[in-house]
Amino acid sequence: MSDYCIISKEIEFDAGHRVPSHRGKCSSPHGHRYKIKVKCRGKILDEAGESDDGMVIDFSDLKEIMTEKIHEVLDHSFIVWKDDDRLLKHFEQQSDWRIVVLPHTPTAENLARWCWQQVDYALKHRPKTLLELIEVAIWETPTSVAYYTGKKI
């Protein structure tokens, strides 16, 4: 019988964004040093002789998923909402810039939701994984963080 454990992993990336309808400074293009923390719950594997024996998931495997699905996509990019026509038109002239278009305004809350979707999909389609994603946190600044749990209110 295996025990459950909660684990977490953090990564960081740098990106720009804007919140077009914001009443303050955030309506202007600007950037952040984001930190993402993913929390998972799962059974501690009991497979003697296996590399991940005694683990929920090897931290390096979770880091690989987060790096591929989040860091490599968003790092040093400009994140734009799909309906931000003004900014998208401006970026059309900059074909060599890394632009990531998202379906929602790129707030910390929506980025946490987007990161959840990327990691959750990867975990569910990973062989031998009995993990449940329970939380994604994203720090937009050292004192401003959004938590996404995938649960409807």
Image (cartoon, rainbow, N blue to C red):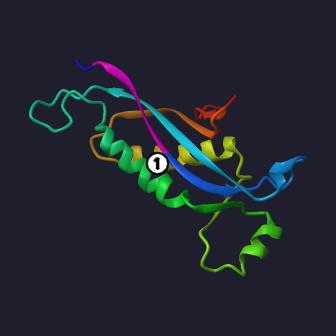
**Above-or-below relation of 33 to 145:** below
- Is residue 147 shown left or right of residue 121? right
Q: State the residue at coordinates (81%, 57%).
A: 28
Q: Residue furthest left?
A: 49
Q: Which residues are magenta?
A: 3-11
Question: How many C-alpha atoms fall within 10 Å of the one at disc 1: few (<14), some, or many (≥20)?
Answer: few
- Residue under label 1: 121
Q: Is 4 contained in the magenta span?
A: yes
The answer to which quarter of the image holds residue 146 is: top right
Q: State the residue at coordinates (71%, 53%).
A: 104
In the picture, which quadrant includes the N terminus? Answer: top left
**Above-or-below relation of 114 to 97:** above
Label 1 secondary element: helix
Q: Residue furthest right?
A: 23
The kind of residue on which mark 1 rests is: Tyr
Q: Is 94 contained in the magenta span?
A: no
- Residue 40: percent from left, percent from top: 43, 31
Give 99 or 114, whichever is nearer the viewer.
99
